Image: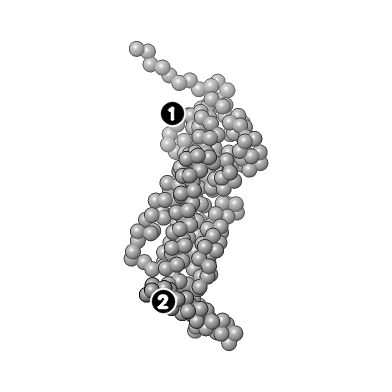
Amino acid sequence: MTRQVNKVAPTDTPAVASTGSAATPARRDLFERELFEKASQLFASKGFSGTTLQDIANALGVSRPSLYHYIRSKDELLERVVCDMAEISDKRIGALLADSAHGPVDKLRAIVVAMTEMVGTHPAHFRILLQNESSLTGELAERHRRSRNAALSAVMSIIEDGKRQALFRPVDTRTAAFTLIGGMNWVVFWHRDGDLATISAEIADMAVRSLAVPDPNTVDGPEELIDLARETLDRLEATLRGQGGADR
């Protein structure tokens, strides 16, 4: 039986041709990063519906048949983005929530670092996801919704634990969670160079400081001390209300 060999389109240069099915894992990974980056730029400028596979191929400098080694359609590209990022997010958050050895402050710091590094490591994926949520339908939209809600619930749960233990201020939990997640997501639009680990740690430190109960020994002046006392009374009142409700 004659073995069929996939031929590379003659319009491809040798360098581009090697990005096909016979490419090394490193070259394939490099090409896919460029693929998602170019697609992200095109979706942002032309919209998802206004972008064609030929547009993406042209931006990459390859023929459309060569692009089929990686994606067969725009919908497949979007599906890969949703499923890949949902899987990564679910695994990282699941591992953090299963950790019972650390308290709310450490967990908040850890989840902010994990989510920021995840976004910063896959910027093109997240830009595509954030800019094209309205294009998701059916099971794909549901998969994205479940993963997004799991992340939100995880952050809210950590904040609630911190409030119950009087480690975090009595903020509105949902508002605080959305604020933190929004800040982490925005990294994809401004981070270009620099140490991502250091940036993630700085963002996590800001997140903790924004919620942590101030140390009375570091309060500057009587007005701040009065504000701290009021917050303390608010936390005490909320705790007593919660205990009263539990006793009934």
| Residue 231, percent from left and from top | 52, 79
Secondary structure, mark 1, is loop
Q: On screen, 40 above or below 247?
A: above
Q: Is residue 123 visible?
A: yes
* 182 vs 172, nearest the viewer: 172
Looking at the picture, which amino acid does disc 1 mark? Ala
* Nearest to N terminus: mark 2 or mark 1: 1
Q: Using the rendered view, name the quadrant where residue 185 is placed.
A: bottom right
Q: Which residue lies furthest to the front in this view?
A: 248
* Residue drawn at x 38%, y 68% as measured from the top left: 103
Indicate the quadrant containing the C terminus: top left, top right, bottom left or bottom right: bottom left
Local packing at callout 1 (Cα closer than 10 Å; few below 14, some 14-19, many 20+) is: few
Looking at the picture, which amino acid does disc 2 mark? Gly
Q: Using the rendered view, name the quadrant where residue 48 is placed.
A: top right
* 129 vs 236, nearest the viewer: 236
Which residue is under mark 1? 22
Local packing at callout 2 (Cα closer than 10 Å; few below 14, some 14-19, many 20+) is: few
Q: Which colour scheme is used?
A: one colour
Q: On screen, 198 above or below 170?
A: above
| Residue 217, percent from left and from top | 49, 84
Which residue is under mark 2? 244
Q: How far apart are marks 2 and 1 (CA)?
A: 67 Å
| Residue 7, percent from left and from top | 48, 20
Q: Is residue 165 visible?
A: no
State which mark lies toward you, 2 or 1.
2
* Residue drawn at x 66%, y 38% as measured from the top left: 46
| Residue 233, percent from left and from top | 50, 81
* Residue drawn at x 45%, y 71% as measured from the top left: 163
